[in-house]
Image (cartoon, helix red, strand yellow):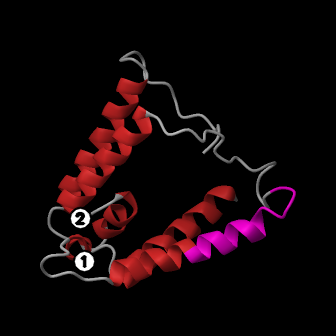
Protein backbone atom coordinates (compact mmCIF):
# COMPACT_ATOMS: atom_id res chain seq x y z
CA UNK A 1 0.00 0.00 0.00
CA UNK A 2 2.85 2.39 0.85
CA UNK A 3 4.29 1.93 -2.65
CA UNK A 4 0.99 2.92 -4.26
CA UNK A 5 0.67 6.01 -2.06
CA UNK A 6 4.26 7.03 -2.83
CA UNK A 7 3.70 6.45 -6.54
CA UNK A 8 0.56 8.61 -6.54
CA UNK A 9 2.29 11.37 -4.58
CA UNK A 10 5.23 11.27 -6.99
CA UNK A 11 2.87 11.54 -9.94
CA UNK A 12 1.10 14.48 -8.31
CA UNK A 13 4.45 16.17 -7.73
CA UNK A 14 5.50 15.54 -11.34
CA UNK A 15 2.23 16.93 -12.68
CA UNK A 16 2.71 20.01 -10.51
CA UNK A 17 6.20 20.50 -11.93
CA UNK A 18 4.92 20.22 -15.50
CA UNK A 19 1.91 22.51 -14.91
CA UNK A 20 4.09 25.17 -13.23
CA UNK A 21 6.59 25.04 -16.09
CA UNK A 22 9.44 23.91 -13.85
CA UNK A 23 10.18 20.95 -16.12
CA UNK A 24 11.35 23.46 -18.76
CA UNK A 25 15.05 24.20 -18.20
CA UNK A 26 14.68 27.53 -20.03
CA UNK A 27 12.35 28.69 -17.23
CA UNK A 28 15.03 28.03 -14.61
CA UNK A 29 17.84 29.51 -16.70
CA UNK A 30 15.79 32.67 -17.31
CA UNK A 31 15.25 32.99 -13.55
CA UNK A 32 19.02 32.86 -13.03
CA UNK A 33 19.68 35.41 -15.80
CA UNK A 34 19.02 38.56 -13.73
CA UNK A 35 20.90 40.80 -16.19
CA UNK A 36 19.08 39.50 -19.27
CA UNK A 37 15.76 37.72 -19.77
CA UNK A 38 14.95 37.46 -16.06
CA UNK A 39 11.73 35.59 -15.27
CA UNK A 40 10.70 35.91 -11.58
CA UNK A 41 7.95 33.25 -11.77
CA UNK A 42 10.23 30.57 -10.29
CA UNK A 43 10.40 32.59 -7.07
CA UNK A 44 6.61 32.41 -6.79
CA UNK A 45 6.61 28.65 -7.40
CA UNK A 46 9.33 28.18 -4.76
CA UNK A 47 7.53 30.51 -2.34
CA UNK A 48 4.30 28.58 -2.80
CA UNK A 49 6.12 25.30 -2.19
CA UNK A 50 7.78 26.62 0.95
CA UNK A 51 4.46 27.91 2.28
CA UNK A 52 2.66 24.61 1.65
CA UNK A 53 5.53 22.62 3.20
CA UNK A 54 5.64 24.93 6.23
CA UNK A 55 1.94 24.49 6.91
CA UNK A 56 2.02 20.78 6.07
CA UNK A 57 4.89 20.03 8.45
CA UNK A 58 3.19 21.94 11.25
CA UNK A 59 -0.02 19.93 10.80
CA UNK A 60 1.56 16.51 10.25
CA UNK A 61 4.08 16.72 13.09
CA UNK A 62 1.25 17.26 15.57
CA UNK A 63 0.40 13.59 15.08
CA UNK A 64 2.05 10.86 17.13
CA UNK A 65 3.07 8.99 14.00
CA UNK A 66 2.51 9.05 10.24
CA UNK A 67 -0.53 7.29 8.78
CA UNK A 68 1.51 4.61 7.01
CA UNK A 69 4.61 4.20 9.17
CA UNK A 70 5.54 3.44 12.75
CA UNK A 71 7.25 6.77 13.30
CA UNK A 72 8.64 9.92 11.73
CA UNK A 73 12.15 9.76 10.24
CA UNK A 74 13.42 13.31 10.37
CA UNK A 75 16.97 14.58 9.85
CA UNK A 76 18.98 14.80 13.04
CA UNK A 77 22.14 16.49 11.74
CA UNK A 78 22.07 20.27 12.09
CA UNK A 79 25.70 21.25 11.46
CA UNK A 80 26.99 22.83 8.27
CA UNK A 81 30.13 21.05 7.13
CA UNK A 82 32.31 20.75 4.05
CA UNK A 83 30.34 17.81 2.70
CA UNK A 84 27.09 19.80 2.81
CA UNK A 85 28.69 22.87 1.23
CA UNK A 86 30.35 20.80 -1.51
CA UNK A 87 27.10 19.02 -2.32
CA UNK A 88 25.18 22.31 -2.39
CA UNK A 89 27.78 23.87 -4.68
CA UNK A 90 27.72 20.91 -7.09
CA UNK A 91 23.92 20.95 -7.09
CA UNK A 92 23.82 24.71 -7.74
CA UNK A 93 26.37 24.55 -10.53
CA UNK A 94 24.53 21.67 -12.20
CA UNK A 95 21.20 23.46 -11.79
CA UNK A 96 22.64 26.64 -13.31
CA UNK A 97 24.26 24.87 -16.24
CA UNK A 98 21.50 22.39 -17.06
CA UNK A 99 18.40 24.17 -15.78
CA UNK A 100 17.23 20.98 -14.08
CA UNK A 101 17.19 19.57 -10.60
CA UNK A 102 16.23 15.92 -9.96
CA UNK A 103 12.43 16.23 -9.69
CA UNK A 104 11.86 18.31 -12.82
CA UNK A 105 14.43 16.25 -14.75
CA UNK A 106 12.51 13.04 -14.11
CA UNK A 107 9.20 14.78 -14.87
CA UNK A 108 10.63 16.15 -18.13
CA UNK A 109 11.59 12.64 -19.26
CA UNK A 110 7.91 12.06 -19.98
CA UNK A 111 7.78 15.20 -22.13
CA UNK A 112 10.58 13.97 -24.41
CA UNK A 113 12.54 17.23 -24.25
CA UNK A 114 15.91 17.16 -26.01
CA UNK A 115 18.85 16.67 -23.68
CA UNK A 116 16.75 15.48 -20.76
CA UNK A 117 17.81 11.84 -21.04
CA UNK A 118 21.48 12.84 -21.18
CA UNK A 119 21.02 15.04 -18.10
CA UNK A 120 19.24 12.28 -16.15
CA UNK A 121 21.92 9.70 -17.05
CA UNK A 122 24.68 12.12 -15.99
CA UNK A 123 22.78 12.87 -12.78
CA UNK A 124 22.43 9.16 -11.96
CA UNK A 125 26.14 8.67 -12.66
CA UNK A 126 26.84 11.57 -10.28
CA UNK A 127 24.68 9.94 -7.60
CA UNK A 128 26.67 6.73 -8.01
CA UNK A 129 30.05 8.52 -7.87
CA UNK A 130 28.99 10.42 -4.73
CA UNK A 131 27.98 7.17 -3.07
CA UNK A 132 31.26 5.47 -3.97
CA UNK A 133 33.27 8.46 -2.73
CA UNK A 134 31.30 8.68 0.52
CA UNK A 135 31.93 4.99 1.25
CA UNK A 136 35.66 5.30 0.61
CA UNK A 137 35.58 3.48 -2.72
CA UNK A 138 34.66 0.14 -1.22
CA UNK A 139 31.52 -1.83 -1.79
CA UNK A 140 28.51 0.42 -2.16
CA UNK A 141 26.06 -0.56 0.58
CA UNK A 142 22.40 -1.09 -0.16
CA UNK A 143 20.05 1.76 0.68
CA UNK A 144 18.86 1.66 4.27
CA UNK A 145 15.72 3.02 5.83
CA UNK A 146 17.47 5.42 8.18
CA UNK A 147 16.74 9.09 8.72
CA UNK A 148 15.88 11.10 5.65
Q: Earlier in the sequence, mark 1 or mark 2?
A: 1
Q: Is residue 45 left or right of residue 25?
A: right
Q: Residue 103 or 87: which is nearer the viewer?
A: 87
Q: Residue furthest left?
A: 36
The numbered mark at residue 99 is: 2
For image coordinates 26% across by 72% down, the residue present is 28
61 falls in the magenta region:
yes
Q: Position of residue 140 (x, y in %)?
A: 43, 24
The numbered mark at residue 53 is: none
- 10 Å crowding of disc 1: few (<14), some (14-19), many (20+): many
Q: Which range is magenta?
A: 51-65
For image coordinates 49% across by 71% down, the residue present is 13
For image coordinates 27% across by 58% down, the residue present is 95
The quarter of the picture where residue 64 lies is: bottom right
Magenta: predominant secondary structure element?
Answer: helix
Q: Position of residue 6 (x, y in %)?
A: 60, 61
- Label 1 to label 2, Cα distance in Å? 8 Å
In the image, is residue 139 above or below residue 17? above
Q: Quadrant of the C terminus?
A: top right
The quarter of the picture where residue 111 lies is: bottom left
Q: Which residue is mark 1?
A: 27
Q: Residue 76 or 104: which is nearer the viewer?
A: 76
Amino acid sequence: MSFVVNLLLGLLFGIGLVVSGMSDPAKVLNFLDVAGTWDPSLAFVMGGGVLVAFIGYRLVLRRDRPLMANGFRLPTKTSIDGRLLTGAAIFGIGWGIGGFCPGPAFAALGLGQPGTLAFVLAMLAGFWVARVVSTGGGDVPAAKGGPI
